[in-house]
Amino acid sequence: MRDQIKAALAVVLVGGLVYVAWVQFSGKDLLPAGSLPKKAAEPDTSRLAELKGIASVTGAAAGAGTEYNLGGRNLFQYGLPKPPPPSPAELEAMRKAEEARLKAMEEDARRRADQQRQAQELERQAREAQEALARQKQPEQAAAKPAEPPKPPPPPINLRLVGYLGPPKARIAVFLSGKEIVLGRKGDVIDGKFKVLSLGHESVEMGYVDPAHEGVKKKVELGS
């Protein structure tokens, strides 16, 4: 059965090829005239001239003859385009603005220096005035301060040195106070107010116990 179908298909295919070859050699259409689709009607071009005045596009409106300017921008480089260099007038304006700025800075610095000098001068004058006022007040303060009372004179040493006792390194001075004999070594206090400071060969140096006469010294000579 399968072989019969293959044989039938081969017969149909051979028949079709023979028909196509006959059509090409005979110059006839491959399909009948009634089976071809109808051609579309050609457009009416009689009124195209009326449309020329209604819609006309000039070359200038369409951009013909214009040059596209990229403004120095590189299409292959991202970022904002570089600004154009300043013109001579802009450079002159920039130069004048910079000169004005520098001049204003110099004037401001000069004004600040003058203010500082004035402040220093005022401070110096105020200091001198205070010093002069203080010098004027010193005599007044000294006059207003009460004078200290003079120190009373030390009491007289009424002792007579009449001689020594003992060896030279351990001498004892012999004094006569009125009719009484008084003995004294170095550092001894006599009569509660005199102090033996040192013993010499022919004199004794005496001082005072009272702090008011501290530093006051007197020599008592032998036989005096």
Image: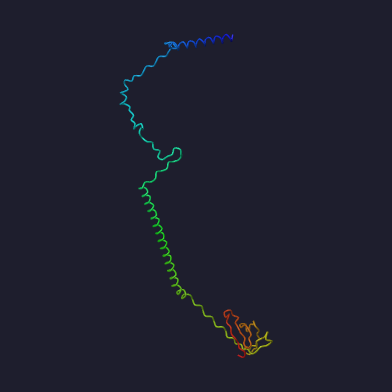
Relative to residue 161, is residue 39 drawn left or right? left
In this orientation, which residue lies closer to the viewer: 80 or 73?
73
Kindly give the residue lying farthest to the bottom in the view shown: 223
- The vertical placement of 130 against 223, above or below, is above
Q: Quadrant of residue 125?
A: bottom left
Relative to residue 172, is residue 128 drawn left or right? left
Q: Position of residue 193 (x, y in %)?
A: 61, 82
- The vertical placement of 29 against 171, above or below, is above
- The vertical placement of 217 against 112, above or below, is below
Q: Position of residue 92 (x, y in %)?
A: 36, 50
Q: Position of residue 137 (x, y in %)?
A: 45, 72
Q: Position of residue 81 (x, y in %)?
A: 42, 41
In this orientation, which residue lies closer to the viewer: 10 or 110?
10
- The vertical placement of 32 against 76, above or below, is above
In this orientation, which residue lies closer to the viewer: 23 or 100?
23
Numbered disc total: 0
Q: Quadrant of residue 181?
A: bottom right
Q: How is the image coloured?
A: rainbow
Q: Quadrant of the N terminus?
A: top right
Kindly give the residue lying farthest to the right in the view shown: 167
Kindly give the residue lying farthest to the front in the view shown: 25
In this orientation, which residue lies closer to the viewer: 19 or 38?
19
Q: Quadrant of the C terminus?
A: bottom right
